[in-house]
Image (tube, grey):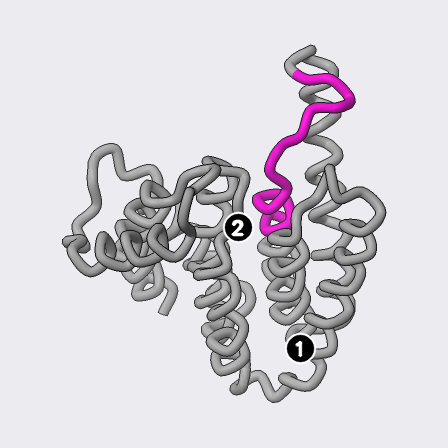
Amino acid sequence: MEAVVALLGLIVGRYVRTLAACFVPNPPDTREEARAALDAVLRTVPVPRWPPAVEVATAAVAALVAWRAGPPYVYFALAGTALALIDWRTARLPDVITLPSYPILALTLLPTGELPRALLGALALAAAYAVLWFARPEAMGLGDVKLAGLIGMAAAAMSWQTWVVAAVGGQLSGALYAIVLLLTRRATRDTQFPFGPFMLLGAFTALCLGQ
């Protein structure tokens, strides 16, 4: 099964590469940007491009999550990889990907039998990040709050322990990265960087450790 998911990841990774190239840091019109991204995806031939770094990374994340957490979490792995790459490149988490992922993820988590707990986990983690955003809006965007809901949903569907690991893991990995930047003098205390990839790193780690 993991081999099939890895192959799927290679194919989806080609679309992830296309999506990442379509989004920019400050688009003049987000709706037009979304339409252009959809058009680009529809015209994409699902064959990896060289070097296939994005495709291989997407396949690896999807296969690892499928192996450790199970098939219901594959969509989260694929969408999360796309969001991590886009956020890293643009410091944005586009609503056109994040918001539709809520109902899609809920549907894929139905086989777990834990959808009520998943929805509660989504609400709880989104609320926690909303408090952080309200306290320091210059350090965190609303996109992170919306992403937190997806992470909370996926993690809580497995267990509350997984939810805690995902929540703490995202904060810890982001803090460690900031410390490395400070120690290497590549940033100051006021330097901002995309936090979504670290939130997702914590989530993927939690899902892989949760079984």
Q: Nearer the viewer, residue 62 or 1?
A: 62
Q: Is residue 202 among the parts visible in the rendering?
A: no
Q: Is residue 131 left or right of residue 81?
A: right
Quarter of image, res 53: top left
Say whether residue 57 is magenta: no
Q: Residue at x 32, y 62 (%)?
A: 3
* Quarter in which the C terminus is drawn: bottom right
Instruction: Name the residue at 85% across, 47% down.
Output: 135
Is residue 105 placed above or below 147 in the rendered structure? below
Q: Which disc is residue 93 wearing?
A: 2
Q: Is residue 189 magenta?
A: yes
Q: Residues within 10 Å of mark 1 (few under 14, many from 20)?
A: many
Region rendered in magenta = 187-201
* Residue in front for this viewpoint, 63 or 30: 30
Label 1 residue SS: helix
Q: Nearer the viewer, mark 1 or mark 2?
A: 2
Residue drawn at x 45%, y 67% is 74
Whole-percent x, y for residue 73 in the image = 51, 69
Tell me, for residue 134, which label it has, or none: none
Q: Is residue 183 above or below residue 116?
A: above
Q: Earlier in the sequence, mark 1 or mark 2?
A: 2
- Position in image of residue 193 (x %, y %): 62, 32
